[in-house]
Image (cartoon, helix red, strand yellow):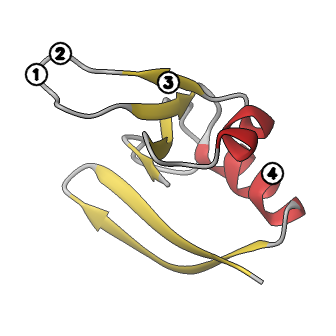
């Protein structure tokens, strides 16, 4: 789960998966699949803020294991219990 948001308060887009992600989970999140110009891969994104996505994932049994910042991008690592 990644976001270009500078904080949890900002609105997405929030990247929630890649082309190999579970389509049922992506549908639950309301994600749209897209291919950005210049990329050789597809990604799923939502317009929700990261906190909204994290709350939805928590309801499905996912828990945040770690979080880090890479430039202006925030990256969360989650694990399903």
Other-residue count near label 1 (Cα within 10 Å), few / some / many at <14 / 14–19 / ≥20: few
Q: Quadrant of residue 67?
A: bottom left
Q: Secondary structure at mark 3?
A: strand
Image x and y of residue 23, in percent: 66, 39
Residue at 31% from the left image edge and 21% from the top image edge:
35
Q: Quadrant of residue 10?
A: top right
Say which mark, if any, is on residue 37. 2
Q: Is residue 8 visible in the rendered structure shown here?
A: yes
Find disc 4 in the rendering and name its residue: 56
Mark with earlier residue (3, 4): 3
Say which mark, if any, is on residue 33. 3
* Cα separation between marks 3 and 2: 13 Å
Determine whether label 4 and label 2 are within 8 Å by CB.
no
Mark whose residue sits in front, 1 or 4: 1
52 with respect to 20 (left or right): right
Determine whether label 1 and label 4 are within 8 Å by CB.
no
Mark with earlier residue (1, 4): 1
Image x and y of residue 1, in percent: 50, 55
Check the image and name the residue furthest to the top.
Answer: 37
* Cα separation between marks 2 and 1: 4 Å
Q: Secondary structure at mark 1?
A: loop
């Amino acid at each position: 789960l990644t976001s270009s948001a500078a904080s949890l308060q900002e609105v997405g887009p929030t990247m929630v998966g890649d082309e190999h992600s579970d389509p049922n989970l992506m549908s639950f999140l309301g994600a749209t699949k897209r291919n950005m110009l210049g990329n050789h891969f597809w990604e799923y994104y939502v317009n929700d803020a990261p906190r909204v996505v994290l709350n939805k994932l928590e309801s499905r049994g996912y828990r945040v294991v770690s979080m880090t910042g890479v430039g202006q991008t925030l990256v969360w690592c989650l694990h399903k219990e």
